[in-house]
Amino acid sequence: MGKKKRTAKVTNKKQSRRAKKMGKAPGSVIYMGNREGEKSSVHILEYQEHQIDEFEFDVYKQEDFEKIIEFKNSPSISWIDVIGLSDEKLIEKLGTSFGLNLLSIEDAVNTNQRPKIDEYDNYIFGVFNMLYLDHNNELVAEHVAIVLMENTVIVLQELKDDVFDGIYNRIKSKTGRIREKGADYLFFALLDAIIDNYFVILENINSKIEILEEDVYLHPTPEIAQDIQLLKKEVLRIRRWIYPVKEMISKLIDTEHPLITKDTKLFLRDAMDHSIEINETLQVYREMSMSLMEMYISNVSNKMNEVMKVLTIMASIFIPLTFIAGVYGMNFDYIPELHLKYGYFYVWGLMILIFVGLLFYFKRKNWL
């Protein structure tokens, strides 16, 4: 009963969030996530090949807000990380100050938005699902929007935790080519980090499948069937989040937008290869998760057949013994064997002989 009530509660919560958008005009900035009430914060990393600066701003202070907007015209590369999307008015104000279309701002806070890439005259806008494992090894799906401008990349995400630590460390330590490239390479690096972490999620799914395969073979309990069902749903959710990425990267490779250079397109082709591999692996895992349930049903049926076979063999052994006992248990006055001195032992000997003989016969037939 508890599970049913909880499911209904979650469903009603989703319906209430969707109801907020019903009847609203396109471009209405309405947060659709479940992390409401969290304040937004802004962290900025500004760098050139031989220089780097880092800033933390209180976006709710007008003075700091104006300083954030100034980075739009900075000649250096600016990575503006906006954390917390539930403050709709603030996100709308921030987006319009950077010249973003209201439709883009709407998608930035719509956590149900399907991953996509939109191109505008002065920026490229992308929505992604960032997947990673928390400290309890549980899957976290975080909505993230990335905006590419001439010298600026804006990241709008729900939580402080993300998969961008590697990029941050590369910029800080001047490792690799990222400090020598433009904003489009930073955009690619962020996208590549999201894609690379999909492999971590796939490894986790593979481990779950291997564990469930062993459990299904050794201990096909009803709890295992529930775990298989949860795994199937998880694989389908992940596939829905990841599958569009291949199409998005293909669009970036084919685009003629001046913000994406030919040099960056070469790196995007590598990300394309990774996305294809991920989608193919996900398809395999989807089929494996479905076959796990078939394997479970088959093993349960096999175990039931083993039980039925043992019961059938026991019944087959006792049928002739029951027949003999029944014959000599009849209430006729004259049964010659009843008057034999050792008739009782003869009957027992016959029954034991039949019992041993049937066991030997079943063993030779490999039925035991």
Image: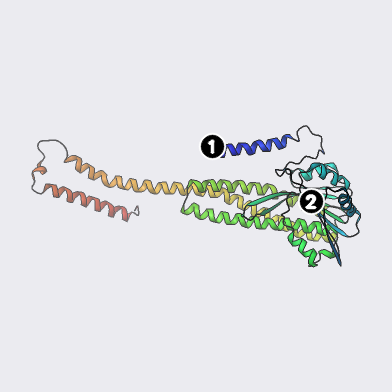
Secondary element at tag 2: strand
Q: Secondary structure at mark 1?
A: loop
Taking 172 as reference, is 256 above or below it?
above
Tags 2 and 1 touching, CB below 8 Å: no
Q: Is residue 289 visible?
A: yes
Query: Of tags 2 and 1, which is closer to the observer?
Result: 2
Q: Nearer the viewer, residue 143 or 297?
A: 143
Whichever of labels 2 and 1 marks the residue nearer the N terminus, that label is 1
Q: Which mark is residue 87?
A: none
State the image coordinates of residue 12 (x, y, percent, origin top left).
65, 35
* Residue 129 in picture, x, y percent from top left: 72, 50
Residue lying at the far top of the rendered structure: 23
Residue at image coords 79%, 57%: 188
Q: x, y (%) of residue 317?
A: 27, 47
Camera-side residue of 268 and 46? 46
The disc labelled 1 sits on which kind of residue? Met
**Is 76 positioned to the left or the right of 328 in the image?**
right
The residue that mark 2 highlights is 41
Q: Out of 70 and 28, give the one closest to the viewer.
A: 70
Q: Nearer the viewer, residue 26 or 267?
A: 26
Q: Residues within 10 Å of mark 1 (few under 14, many from 20)?
A: few
Which residue is rendered at x = 68% and y = 55% of the image?
198
Mark 1 lies on residue: 1
Amino acid type, callout 2 = Ser
Expressed as whole percent of the image width and height from the top left, the position of residue 246 reads 74, 52
Alpha carbons under labels 2 and 1: distance apart = 41 Å
| Number of numbered discs on residues | 2
Q: Residues within 10 Å of mark 2 (few under 14, many from 20)?
A: some
Residue 104 in view here:
no
Coloring scheme used: rainbow
Q: Residue at x 53, y 53 (%)?
A: 212
